[in-house]
Amino acid sequence: MTHTLMEADIMEIQVRSVINIIFLFLILSCDSDKNIMVVNDSDINLDLSKRYVQYNDKIFSGKVVKLYSNTNDTFSISIYKNGLKDNIWKKFYRNGNIQELREYKKGKKIGKYSGYYINGNKKFEENFKNNFNHGKIFVWSNDGKLIRESNFINGYESGKQQRWDKNGKIISNYIIKNNRRYGLLGTKNCINETDSLYIY
């Protein structure tokens, strides 16, 4: 009986310790958020023109918020660390829905770059590495149909590249291999359709 009580006491102490650690982590997380400087993009002390963004002539770390004109609705939230673009950047529609999400690290584009239509449907998704397209690119129409799928390596097309019209008919289907293009490029009336398809 005593042995069982000791085990129960030890378990209770362990559970309390875990709860205290979680609570402390949450408090510290909240505190660190409060210490982040938030600046309006129209603040005259903010200088976005420099290579390293400055605030009051000092290298800036914090959030820059841009509002839609004549409203308090947020258009974008941009994050800087040591004067360079960093973390997840967000753009919003007037109704509050996400328009774009883009990731930076030390001023360079990395990870996923996603765009959405005002109705919430996915518009595009790109992948970046070291500032260059790297991986797949997808583009969808407003009603959710896939209209482009491409592959990139370090900023250059590589592998399968496909495009469809709004009815699902394939209009471009080719492969890039050893810097050469093989397949249907998608031309009409001597105009390369691929030049005008990918606009968002």
Image (spheres, rainbow, N blue to C red):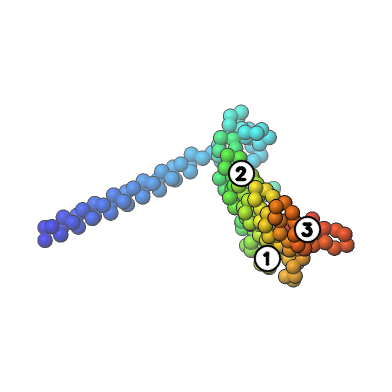
Is any atom of residue 186 visible in this view?
yes
Q: Picture quarter containing residue 3?
A: bottom left
The residue identified by callout 1 is 146
Q: Is residue 59 left or right of residue 16?
A: right
Q: Amino acid at mark 2?
A: Asn
Q: Picture quarter containing residue 46?
A: top right
Is any atom of residue 64 visible in this view?
no
Q: CA distance from mark 1 to mark 2?
A: 27 Å
Q: Amino acid at mark 1?
A: Leu
Instruction: Locate residue 26, reporting x and y percent.
Output: 40, 48
Instruction: Locate residue 179, reporting x and y percent.
Output: 72, 51
Q: Are marks 2 and 3 in contact (CB under 8 Å)?
A: no
Residue at x 66%, y 36% (from the top left corner):
48
Numbered mark located on residue 194 in the image: 3
Q: Is residue 199 left or right of residue 57?
A: right
- Give the mark, 1 or 2, whose residue is nearer the N terminus: 2
Q: CA distance from mark 3 to mark 1?
A: 15 Å
